[in-house]
Amino acid sequence: MPAAPSLSLVDPIDALLTAHGLRRTDAARRVLGWLLAHPDTSYTHAQLQTALQNDITAAGQGEAGSALDRVTLYRLIDRLTQVGLLLCRVDARRVRRYQAMPASVHALPHFECQSCHRDQPLQGALQGNALDLEVAAQNALQALKVLGYQGLSLDLAVRGVCADCATAAQTTNQTP
């Protein structure tokens, strides 16, 4: 009786890395996997390094888990950004923040509080208008492609004071 053919399932992270011409290293899998698992959060380089280290510790791997040094992590997120798997934004304080870039999305609107510097996605808040924003982003990117521009992405940043900070400021001002 012949052996049943085994169906090897391709890891989606490995498939993404291969499709974008990147090596499927443990470090690349961990970084991309973490960011894809937290799609609504943008991380600075230091925050991402801390999150990955905490994940190793929480998994019980302790020192056995291979921690990424800051240079390796920086080079890796730079490559992931160059091939379009990550979105890199520079906030008002000129700090770079990285976030997984969904393949179908051309614009990721976000709000940055000028008081607490939290970075929050706005797609949920925009709801019905998010589709209009996506269409506008696609039109703008297409117009630029026609002019010869390449490797395009669009970052829509709204800056101001978040509701939490505004409420805290009002409470402070009203206290006698």
Image (spheres, rainbow, N blue to C red):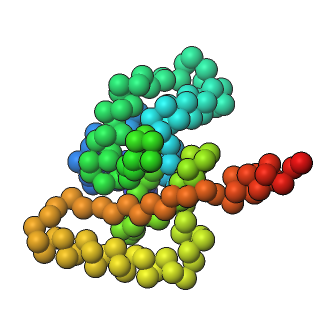
Q: Nearer the viewer, residue 136 or 54?
A: 136
Q: Is residue 74 left or right of residue 50?
A: left
**Residue visible at 49% across and 76% down in the picture:** 130
**Residue visible at 61% across and 30% down in the picture:** 54
Count of marks, rendered view: 0
Q: Is residue 158 above or below residue 129?
A: above
x%, y% of residue 147?
11, 71
Q: Nearer the viewer, residue 93 or 153?
A: 93
x%, y% of residue 170?
77, 56
Which image quarter: residue 103? bottom left
Which image quarter: residue 143? bottom left
Q: Nearer the viewer, residue 117 or 136?
A: 117
x%, y% of residue 11?
43, 51
**Residue found at the far right of this picture:** 176
Position of the N terminus by quadrant: bottom left
Q: Is residue 81 visible?
A: yes
x%, y% of residue 163?
69, 60
Q: Is residue 148 above or below residue 74?
A: below
Q: Is residue 117 above or below residue 68?
A: below
Q: Is residue 129 left or right of residue 153?
A: right
Q: Is residue 53 left or right of residue 109?
A: right
Q: Is residue 13 visible?
A: no
**Residue found at the far left of this picture:** 148
Q: Is residue 51 above or below residue 167?
A: above
**Residue visible at 55% across and 30% down in the picture:** 50
**Residue found at the far front of this picture:** 176
Which image quarter: residue 96? top left
